[in-house]
Image: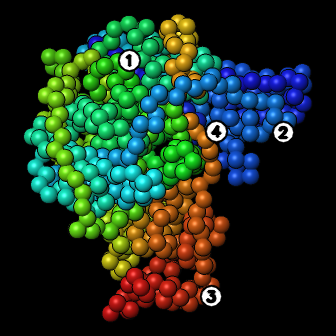
Amino acid sequence: MKIIVCIKQVPDAKDVRLDPKTNTMAREGVASIMNPFDRHALEEGVRLKEQHGGTVTVVSMGPPQAEAVLRDAVACGADEAVLVSDRAFAGADTWATTYTLAKAIEKNGPFDLIICGKQAIDGDTAQVGPGLAKRLNIPYVSYVRKITAFENGFLSLHRLMDDGYDEVEIPLPGLLTVVKEINEPRVPSLKGKMKAKSLSINTLNAEDIGADANSIGLPGSTTQVVKVFAPVFKGERTMLEGTVDEQVEQLVNKLEPYL
Amino acid sequence: MLRIDIEACIGCGVCEEVCTFEAIEVVDGVAVVNEKCTLCGSCVDSCETGAISIETKEKTVQADLGDWSGIMIYAEFRHGKLAPVSFELLGIGRELADQQQVPLSAILLGSGMDGVARELVSYGADIVYQVDAPALELFTDEMYGNILEDVIREHKPEVVLAGATAIGRSFIPLVATALATGLTADCTQLAIRPEDGVLLQTRPAFGGNIMATIECPYTRPQMATVRPRVMKTAAPDPDRKGEIINYQPKAERLQSRVRVLRNVLEEQDQVNITEGDIIVAGGRGLDNEKGFALIKQLADAVGGAVGASRAAVDSAWIAYPHQVGQTGKTVNPKLYIACGISGAIQHVVGMQSSETIVAINKDPHAPIFDVATYGIVGDLFEVVPKLIEKIRERRG
């Protein structure tokens, strides 16, 4: 099975803050990490390879420093790495991103399965997986939490729904997006780390993938961010005063309508 | 591409300070951009001499942009009933349609839906396009996506909204990609700019730490998924008039390469903290599972459901379906009592729209007090038992 896993380098979202005065993002102490959902996608790809044979190629679109997450992925069991990088890709929304990734994946050659994390923790859109499948005209299943079988070219899966799960079958080639419950990702092996260190990463730019200049980056995007701001809360708080008994008494009086 | 006017640049370094991506630095007194630039625009806004700009090509606007009119919502129907978010979409959809003076339509897909279209009309839809077919009994991205795509192409609504549910977030991206238009996920605020009819789509990003407003100016329809339990449902009017149209999909559009064998309902999802009027939630301040039992007692005393912060769920004091926040559930009960919850942004985004919020925390600087209606600074192990006692007295 020839497996492609799409990974993204993201800022660790829990540390990202907007300075309310300057309205800019504070970068201090914010680490760049592999998107956590993508780590589960990678693990599932490596497990499938171990069970059924084949290769795992990790693909990332991003600036040159995204090479770090590709090497991390190789240390965790991927065989090859492709970095899709060009300043012209900057400012891409999910529409321009799926175009770019589809072009790069087509350039990379035939595949059986693409696995993505369900969403990236910076944008939280969950749109790249399904959009990429449409671009490549392959079927997809979102929110996969378990792969139960691979027979006759079909993968049997459990897809997480709001009220339980669906049992589904998808023919290959196809695309999956996975949730965290699907597996427990492994830590890099020593052998993997050695391999990651020496691996040469195949870097593709806009010209290499034959991208149309009007379909990539900011010019190729259908949406644009017009404003970013720190969340505002209503906060008309009344702090209760006095002894604990007095405070509790006041609170119960205030809450009378609900009790 | 980012353009720096070297005549205007004074080398002050403010851009270097504000760049999140270390993509710009001052070299020999002039700002220089490198390949790490993501065109986020922070430096453009920060530059006092106006030396930095984002070079954009003249955008091609979709030729028939003006022909697109009306608001359309996708009404999610599953297991014999409409998902609650469908009514919320009709609420916000009605507001937008009235403002634009255009019709509000709903598309309803499923099997065995007698009287459901009528219900959508009573909640605000002017037109309902429905496909009631056995093939649509179980959800498949391709069938649902194909039909929605075809109805949109035929009727050209300027705005299409769907719930940001497992179903909506799975197949709406397929439709947007097929229509070559923009899609904004998980919106919490929507408004239409009267001058040009552009939908202003506001949503949280970076785990709720940042809000972003997004536009889709050049293509139609403007598509968004909307976070459940954020928009208000309009009051139903059983006498409201509307048109119900049975849409006939082409046979080849009722095909799916993915086969759905069956749906399994899970018991854990019976814990529905999103529907009650009162939620009592606990966090890290409870110290341990035993401490968390106090939350259950208070919830019993007030007749409410039990909620939890991510910290409490991660510590395995309570199961995930009780989690409130960006990675859990969004709730808006009448009363939310937060005990020992610091109020990390990722929690607050999930409960801030509650009518009355009570915060009990020993740290007077805990951010939870910023969203609270009433705050008590104190040891919850002292406060909560007294509160339980007093409430029991009141309720007899």
Q: Chain of mark 2?
A: B
Q: Residue at x 26, y 46 (%)?
A: B107
Q: Is residue A236 visible?
A: yes
For the residues carrying marks 1 and 4, which lies nearer the camera in this image? Answer: 1
Q: Are marks 1 and 3 in contact (CB under 8 Å)?
A: no
Measuring from the top left, give residue A113's x and y in whole percent: 31, 18
Please give the count of numbered marks on the rendered protein: 4
What whole-number distance in Å separates the C-alpha atoms at marks 2 and 1? Answer: 45 Å
* Residue located 43% across and 46% down the image: B186
Q: Badge 4: few (under 14), some or many (20 or more) residues near its Cα, within 10 Å? A: some
Q: How far, Cα to Cα, is label 2 from label 4? A: 26 Å
Q: Secondary structure at mark 3?
A: loop
Instruction: Pinpoint residue A188: horizontal percent, then vertical percent.
Output: 47, 24
| Residue identified by numbered label 4 | A30
Q: CA distance from mark 1 to mark 4?
A: 28 Å
SS for tag 1? strand
For marks 1 and 3 on the same chain, the one whose residue lies earlier in the sequence: 1
Q: Could you tell me how far apart the alpha carbons at marks 3 and 2 are, in whole angstroms?
A: 50 Å
Residue under label 2, please give it: B48
Q: Is residue A71 left or right of residue B293?
A: right
* Residue receiving disc 3: A242
Q: Nearer the viewer, mark 2 or mark 1?
A: 2
* Rendering colour mode: rainbow
Q: Is residue B76 above or below residue B390?
A: above
